Image: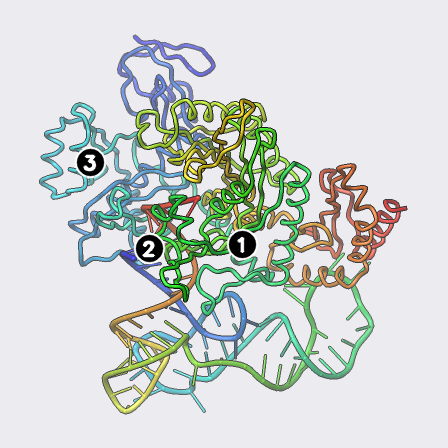
Amino acid sequence: MINIKFPDNSVKQFESGVNSLEIANSISPGLARKIYASTVNGDVKDLTRPINEDSAVIFHKWEDKEAKHTFWHTSAHLMAAALEELYPGIKFGIGPAIENGFYYDVDPGDDVVISESDLPLIEDKMRELAKRNNKVERIEISKADALKLFAEKGDEYKTELISELEDGTISLYKLGNFTDLCRGPHLPDTEKIKAFKLLSVAGAYWKGDEKRKMMTRIYGISFPKQKLLDEYLAMLEEAKKRDHRRIGKELELFAFSQKVGMGLPLWLPRGAELRQRLIDFLTDELKRRGYTIVSTPHVGNVELYKISGHYEKYGADSFQPMNTPQEGEQFMLKPMNCPHHCEIYNATPHSYKDLPIRMAEFGTVYRYEQHGELHGLTRVRSFTQDDAHHFCEADQLKDEFKRIIDLVQWVFKSLDFNEYDAQISLRDASDKERYIGSDENWEKAQKAIIEASAEKGLDTIVVEGEAAFYGPKLDFMVRDAIGREWQLGTIQVDYNLPERFDMTYIGADNQKHRPVLIHRAIFGSLERFVAVLIENTAGKFPLWLSPDQVIILPISEKYHDYSKKVLNFLNNSDIRTLIDERNEKIGKKVRDNELKKIPYLLIIGEKEEKSSTVSVRRQGEGDIGVMKLEEFVNFIREEVKNEIG
RNA sequence: GCCGAUGUAGCUCAGCUGGUCAGAGCAGCUGAUUUGUAAUCAGCAGGCCGGGGGUUCGAAUCCCUUCAUCGGCUCCA
């Protein structure tokens, strides 16, 4: 007999060799029906894996990511089984579960193309196989046998994978006639996979290596109930409506032109206004926080980027150098502002008393991104960074980091922007050669970042080996409407450029010292930030530009026209002038008292409320109430009167 | 750059296997209507069917090529 301990710390006894499914069944058949995997002593296992020793067992229902993971992994195998029947001779790469669903990388042979129009057929075959209620069997074999098995099948991908595994760790899973190399865990059978949809086909390099063969990746998702699938698909549809590319077009915020060139955004009047507001909003705050504003040209001599090292590393991927009438002289569109800012630093001598120097610029940069990479406003070839560089002493690093984190938090909070992840990227300690800068400095900087984040109450993920070669960093990431992750703000320590540009300051000891450089952006780029801002707020608020604040129009298609009418109404009312007057009058006071200059957010009636009213909320204070447009105008009038007396 | 798909009026799209196939709705314009929950009625205007080349008596429809876009991969200072 063995003891099985449950999450509530109760213990029950079972025969050795019992499996999780049997244990669950002994508690209640209802429970057994609802679980998809179990964690046994910390490892996620198949429900049918025998347990032979005293163990702690946790059952995973659909809500748990372990359950979904297992479910989708088995779904991937089901799809592979269907593919093997439909495409004889097809070879398989890897087929994991992902955050939402699963995929399988396959090689159907050189002359065979699987395209999206083939997906329904594959789904039919999957349905057919699922109905047969195939059991999923786990088989453990030796490395030699496994190699032999897949070599006979002629599957070079699997044999390559196996040859990298250690002997004794090899398990196969058999589903019907389909046997796959797999660590598991899996569902006991395919009966529970009731609803699935294959979503898309894409190319993917074998092992993610550009130089290796491109396989066909098929994405899908599955659920234990049709209703869940329907809801998921409906959610995807809704998400598509929030896509900033769609909203940007509909609301005439920005456009692209083939004639101007791909990836070069054109800001339409309304979008440009939004963009300018963001610049003004941030600039005001930067001045308050001890930044100086600088400005640098859009081109630079190629030599500049050779000194900075950017030319060597990124020159081939940039807009290529342009020649001038002067023989032998070449310029480049600036791919980053840093070298320019370094030269601003070097333009004047510095004492330790001047540090830290915080130099900010809304600098437009140009990068020749790969054709296939361009994506709306989130990945473009010309964009404006809200860039800044802090030059400081090593001991000031932590304090500067805290200041920057504080600024990021302030900006995001002010814009009602709550969902982001913060990631700290450290160097790979086992491969120190890859990085520039002394051991001591790296340790100091990494410690400073981690401590600063903790002290600012920032939840961070720490990832080793992701640091840039020139220093560790802290990035702020967000997801777009379709779930893709984008980097916005970034704070990076740099030991490289101060060396390359031979930057110095005179210390208290009257000796020359090397300053530390911190690169930093809050929005990342205005383009990307606007994109993410649109997608984050769309659906919640209508998008529009209020006199003094970003306002979001409702995304539900039905209301677009209505929103435009509201917009016109307000534009034609005297609100704009009123608020301008207000800001004019209290402008100086505001600055001194640090009063926030963020008046009103308008939310135009959402789906259910079929009304021509608007609900009004004041930023940071919540709802003020629902009112008609005329009332809203009067309300603002009163507010402004009270405020400016 | 790589794999797959798409490209028809400002927008969303219909035009199947080549021969009234240049269409619809919304937006726009003109006029009427003034009716409280975006969408009253009538009329008008809008497109070299992404660009180039080819097959054919004939192509939006088939083929090639190029550009752009979409979904991924790779990349991402």
**Callout 3 amino acid:** Leu
Q: Mark 2 and 3 residues: CB-CB less than 8 Å, in contact?
A: no
Question: Mark 1 highlights which residue?
Answer: A244
Residue A636 in the image: state x and y as whole percent.
82, 51
Say which of B58 and A313 sits in front. A313
Question: Mark 3 highlights which residue?
Answer: A161
Residue A611 in the image: state x and y as whole percent.
73, 55
Badge 3: chain ID: A
Spatial CA span between label 2 and label 3: 30 Å
What's the residue at 35%, 42% (across, down)?
A102
Quadrant for the N terminus of chain A in the image: top left
Question: Mark 2 highlights which residue?
Answer: A120
Dot 2 or dot 1, earlier in sequence: 2
Dot 2 or dot 3, earlier in sequence: 2
**So how many labels did they put on this image?**
3
Residue A16 in the image: state x and y as whole percent.
27, 12
What's the residue at 64%, 44% (across, down)?
A282
What's the residue at 24%, 57% (across, down)?
A113
Q: Residues within 10 Å of mark 3 (few under 14, many from 20)?
A: some
Badge 2: chain ID: A
Q: Which mark is residue A635?
A: none
Residue lying furthest front in this view? A510
